[in-house]
Amino acid sequence: MANPNPTTQQGTEVYSVWALPPESVRPRLKSLMSGLRAEYGGPEFEPHITVVGAIRLTPESALEMIRSATSGLRPYKAKVTSVSRGTFFYQCVYLLIEPTKEVVEASADCCVHFGYQSSTPYMPHLSLLYQDLTDEEKDEAVKKAEELDKEICGLEFEISEFALYKTDTEDKSLKSWEKIEVCRLDGKLA
């Protein structure tokens, strides 16, 4: 069961787990994201690689699970392989992350702790733009991203923090989205 029916679970919220790029890389990513929003609109959000997609939990369970999941993980490398586009709002334009053993296992381990099962294989990516665009506009946005940062492909960085976010996916403005906790990948709170 990937995403339990939201109407049957009182006292729960929708959460996601994100791998956070290091502080040294975030300004570069934010600049690229800002350039795309200036051209195509869309809400502002923090750069991240989704590790566990939207799952409905109680606040207490979510905190317990993120702490448990990160206690057994170690930092790992992430590498951008290309700029690409998806088929829906939350995967409009993104950086595809090389699905190395470490990247895939970190997500799989976290999903086990959260009891999360996806109906699709894990595709590590770092979204640049959330927006409803036509296929033609998405293709243009991919080219724009490649123009804005000609050397983004090949960018490599260490993931050493996961964040628990409240992410109501019905809220496309993202105004209700909230960072709940950041954990280092050594089991300690950041």
Image: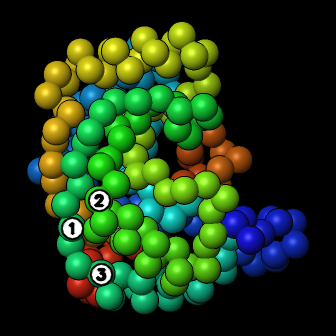
Residues at circles 3 and 2 in contact by the CB criterion of under 8 Å: no
Distance between the alpha carbons at the discs numbered 3 and 2: 15 Å
Q: Which mark is on residue 76?
A: 1
The amino acid beneath tag 2 is Thr
Q: Are marks 3 and 1 in contact (CB under 8 Å)?
A: yes
Residue at the image point whose x is 46% and y is 72% from the top: 108
Note whether 145 is above or below 100 in the view shown. Answer: above
Regarding mark 2 in the picture, which secondary structure is present there? loop
Tag 1: residue type?
Tyr
Residue 51 is drawn in which quadrant?
A: bottom left
- Residue 103 pos. (x, y %): 32, 63
- In front of the other: 56 or 79: 79
| Residue depicted at x 80% and y 65% | 6
Q: Is residue 74 rendered to the left or right of residue 182?
A: left
Residue occupying the far right of the picture: 8
- For label 3, count other residues whose C-alpha is less than 10 Å away and answer few (under 14), some (14-19) or many (20+): many
In the rendered structure, find residue 112 and report the number of the disc placed on it: none
Residue 41, position as x, y percentages in the image: 49, 21
Q: Which residue is mark 2?
A: 100
Q: Which residue is drawn at the image coordinates 19% and 60% (left, top)? A: 77
Locate residue 51 relative to residue 35 in the image: left or right: right
Check residue 73 in the rendering and tell me which mark sits there, or answer none. 3
Marks 1 and 2: CB-CB under 8 Å?
yes
The label nearer to you, 1 versus 2, is: 2
> Real-space Cα distance between discs 1 and 2?
10 Å
Whole-angstrom CA distance, mark 3 to mark 1, is 9 Å
* Residues packed near mark 2 inside 10 Å, few (<14), some (14 to 19) or many (20 plus): some
Q: Nearer the viewer, residue 105 or 26?
A: 105
